[in-house]
Amino acid sequence: MAAQLIDGKKVAADIRAKLKSEIDELKSKGISPGLAVVLVGENPASKKYVSSKEKTCDEIGIKSFSHKLPESITQKELIDLIDDLNNDENVHGILVQLPLPKYLNEKEIMNRIAPEKDVDGFGPDALGKLVLDEPGFVACTPHGAIKMLDAYNIDPKGKHAVVVGRSVIVGKPLALLLLRKHATVTIAHSRTPDLKETCLGADILCVAVGKAKMITGDMVKEGAAVIDIGINVTPEGKIVGDVDFEPAKERAGYITPVPGGAGPMTIAMLMYNTVLAAKMAAGMKVEV
């Protein structure tokens, strides 16, 4: 029996609708959430992502401050811009679209974003709070993965979750979020000795490595929930995930499609964090 599809588009739409209502209420109190988006250069994928984020801002009522900069910008000029945005009361969240050109010091730039405006959740303050189980911004893609599990009543408590991938922006924070949900968590990566055996032990299998169809159908446990966070473009121009979808869906209990799974959730959770930042800036009590 084929797996039930986890519809990231629908879950994201539900989150956006709820946020729109919250934003309307905030505006009635004189609070207008604002998101600054910084794009350096002409990377086509980055331009597409930024356009989607700006469109979503417009749809739900978040004011978008767009800064599209030439690839010739210096480190100091970019740092100065972030400092200005940090001090702008109309800007509640700052997003610097990655990757940056190689000549720029990405770590220095990302760390320059004020912790109260780090709506991407990539900075040391946000990651530290996640480790310490303190309230704070959670990186958007892993937070979106958890929201999809919640939407389909897939409770990680007492289950074995395997996260394939150990990046700071997806793998590590997702493992910590699953721990918060009382799962037993294994992080697998390129040096895991027997990746197939590890994956077959997963009740919840989350994959974020950026390698097309790396996880084959015979690596998925019968009935497992599979969250595919990979987005890859084949030589034929087709978008596929890190999981070989067709054979995997015949074994899994639940599975996210690519596209239409994790992607829409990432943008929805960015909007969620921006609204959260606006509430915190206004001194409102929030639940994270």
Image: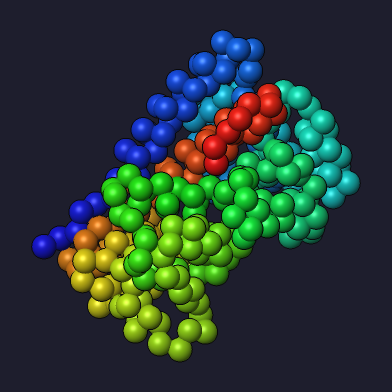
Q: Position of residue 52 (x, y in %)?
A: 50, 36
Query: Is residue 71 positioned above or below 181 on the image?
Result: above
* Quadrant in which the N terminus is drawn: bottom left
> Which residue is pictured at 40% across the width and 87% down the height?
194
Q: Quadrant of residue 9?
A: top left
* Quadrant in which the C terminus is drawn: top right
Q: Position of residue 219 (x, y in %)?
A: 30, 77
Q: Position of residue 205 (x, y in %)?
A: 36, 67
Q: Quadrant of residue 64?
A: top right
Residue 32 is left or right of residue 86, and the answer is: left
Residue 65 at least partly seen: no
Question: Observer-nearest residue: 68 or 61?
Answer: 61
Residue 173 is left or right of residue 94, and the answer is: left
Residue 287 is left or right of residue 281, and the answer is: left
Residue at far left of view: 1
Q: Position of residue 87 (x, y in %)?
A: 82, 31
> Which residue is pictured at 50% across the width and 41% down the height?
269
Question: Observer-nearest residue: 35 or 69?
Answer: 35
Residue 246 is left or right of residue 60, and the answer is: left
> Which residue is pictured at 45% across the width and 70% down the height?
185
Residue 147 at least partly seen: yes
Task: Give the total of numbered labels.
Answer: 0
> Which residue is pictured at 42% across the width and 70% down the height?
184
Question: Observer-nearest residue: 252 or 244?
Answer: 252
Query: Is residue 151 positioned above or below 198 on the image?
Result: above
Question: Observer-nearest residue: 99 or 163?
Answer: 163
